[in-house]
Image: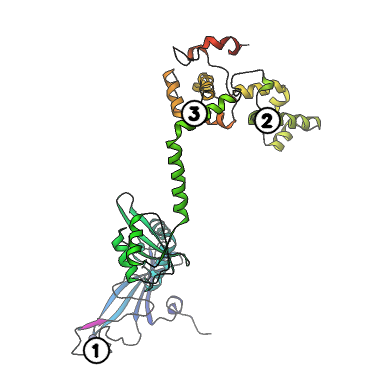
Amino acid sequence: MGAVGVEDVLFAGIDVRVTAVHVAAEGVVVEASACGRTPSCPDCGCPGRRIHSRYTRRLAERPVAGRPLVISLQVRRFFCERRTCNRRTFAEQVPDLTEPQRRHSVGLRRWMRTIATFLGGRPGERLCRALQLPAGRTHLLGLLTAPAVPEQAPRVLGVDEFAFRKGWRYGTVLVDVEAAHVVDVLPDRDAVTFADWLREHPGTEIICRDRASAYSSAVRDAAPDAQEVADRWHLLANLSSAVEKTCHQHRLCLRKQAEAERDAQPRPIINPLPSPTLPPTKIAVRTRDRYADIHRLLAEGCSVSAIARLLHLDRKTVRRFRDTDLDQLLSSARHGRPKGVLEPFTAYLTDRLSDGVTSPTDLFHEIQLRGYQGSDLPVRRYVAGLRMGTVEPAAAPSPVLARSPSGSCCPAAHCGRTRKTSS
Ligand SMILES: [Zn+2]
């Protein structure tokens, strides 16, 4: 086996001769000269015989062993000797290495086009930077060439608008629904443009579209035989917005109905009653389960550390469950929620929620008027928790927070039975 040269490694199958290799910290420069067959004039095809001049091109190539690689390539310029040809001279190109006017090798361009295809502009630019490839996002996007538009429209054509810039400029995207790929992109969403396209590309049998009238009138004009189908996404979107609109129009009677139903049912237990009658909430259930688990394991002789590991709990929690009785744990689970600024208002929120005021924003404003200094987030969390049953309802409001001075709900009316007895 003969010695392998740099040509064989870097330029396998390419007609160049390497004359020097310079290795520096910032990269590798390979000096080479083209040595292929004499080229022909790109205009008339006349083979070049007389050399006009030689010059050196610099080509960025794919990095070698992590270092940027530049090829300093000497090429020849030839005279075109055909008198009828308008071209006087032409430069030679090296197949699989150079292209006219390009400063990147064919291989490097192929890499960058692949990156642009998979990643697009900005992510592609970041990857190129990491790989030391000389490419910005505009350059990458410029490498993406649009696929050829077929002469005939697909049998099932999907049409929808898309935003070049939301709220400003829209285009139309045409899709081959059966093959699931984009067929063409139109510069606007006008009926005329789409109708012209349909005339230039006949043959579609079914057109899936949204319910916009522009596309419909284009289909009527340019492809009257095609069957129009509302696509599933738009059907569902339209249905849900119709339902929403209808509900909104009937919100008064819906509210009345809901109130009538609620009045017919016993009022939910919101105000504090003796603990055994409280509905089991997630917290209470969890506390009971945890208590049972810990005491079972303790009875089996497990240590606190072993139980903590087994149940994924803190050792402190395990000790608390060991040393506290269940009623006390349940009671602290019930009353141990929102600490801090929201705590004095939880009873008020609970009460208002039972009156049917469910909007966290309204409730937030109401307690703000009563002196709440915090943000709306704890209010939202607490109200959501009450509605989902993940927090226990609080005791009745304290007199200072009673709802209104004129008061449909005077605190005096039920303070006797609802005020928490302090221990
Ligand atoms: Zn020529």
- Tell me the CA gap for discs 2 and 3: 35 Å
Which quadrant of the rendered structure holds the C terminus?
A: top right
Q: Amino acid at mark 3?
A: Lys
Residue behind label 3 places its C-beta within 8 angstroms of ligand 1: no
- Residue found at the far right of this picture: 300
Between circles 2 and 3, the one closer to the viewer is 3
Between circles 2 and 1, the one closer to the viewer is 2
**Which quadrant of the picture is home to ligand 1?**
bottom left
Q: Which mark is residue 256?
A: 3
Would you say 297 lies left or right of 145 here?
right
Would you say 96 lies left or right of 302 here?
left
From this view, report whether residue 311 is shown above or below residue 184. Answer: above
| Dot 2 or dot 3, earlier in sequence | 3
Mark 2, residue position: 285
Element at label 2: helix
Between circles 3 and 1, the one closer to the viewer is 3
**Residue 137 visible somewhere in the drawing:** no
Q: Amino acid at mark 1?
A: Arg
Say if the magenta span includes residue 90.
yes
Q: Which mark is residue 50?
A: 1
Residue 294 spot, x, y in % from top left: 74, 31
